[in-house]
Image (tube, rainbow, N blue to C red):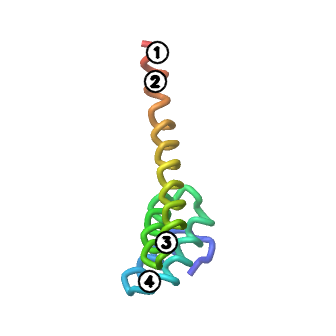
Amino acid sequence: MDDSNALAHFSLGVVHDRQGADASAIAQYRAAIERDPNNVQALVYLADATLRTGSALEAAKTRLEVRMKKSIATICLMTPWANLMRHS
């Protein structure tokens, strides 16, 4: 496996997740996020796996990060439309 590949780490995390190996899944999701900090799907899966391990506070922090990234993405997607409407 290419250690620099975020998708490979995320995919391996999903495999571990489905096998019930939460600690291994969490490690792989974190590795994926280190390589691609904008990977919202990895953040969501990380939050879910973290919650299952009993760390509600850590899961809540991760979910908050997901919401912030989604909000930023929405603003970035809407900005061209707002500019277009102003110039119409």
Relative to residue 70, is residue 36 depicted above or below?
Answer: below
Question: Is the residue marked by circle 1 packed among few (<14), some (14-19), or many (20+) residues within 10 Å?
Answer: few
SS at badge 1: helix
Per the image, the residue denoted by label 1 is 86
Indicate which disc residue 18 carries: none
- Counting from the top left corner in percent of width and height, residue 76 is at 51, 37
What whole-number distance in Å separates the C-alpha atoms at marks 4 and 2? Answer: 43 Å
The amino acid pointed to by label 1 is Arg
Residue at 45% from the left image edge and 86% from the top image edge: 21
Looking at the image, tell me whether mark 2 or mark 3 is earlier in sequence order.
3
Per the image, the residue denoted by label 3 is 10
Relative to residue 21, is residue 13 depicted above or below?
Answer: above
- Counting from the top left corner in percent of width and height, residue 49 is at 45, 74
The amino acid pointed to by label 3 is Phe
Question: Is the residue marked by circle 4 packed among few (<14), some (14-19), or many (20+) residues within 10 Å?
Answer: some
Labelled pair 2, 3 in contact (Cβ < 8 Å): no
What whole-number distance in Å separates the C-alpha atoms at marks 3 and 4? Answer: 10 Å
Labelled pair 1, 4 in contact (Cβ < 8 Å): no
Residue at 46% from the left image edge and 82% from the top image edge: 22
Labelled pair 1, 2 in contact (Cβ < 8 Å): yes
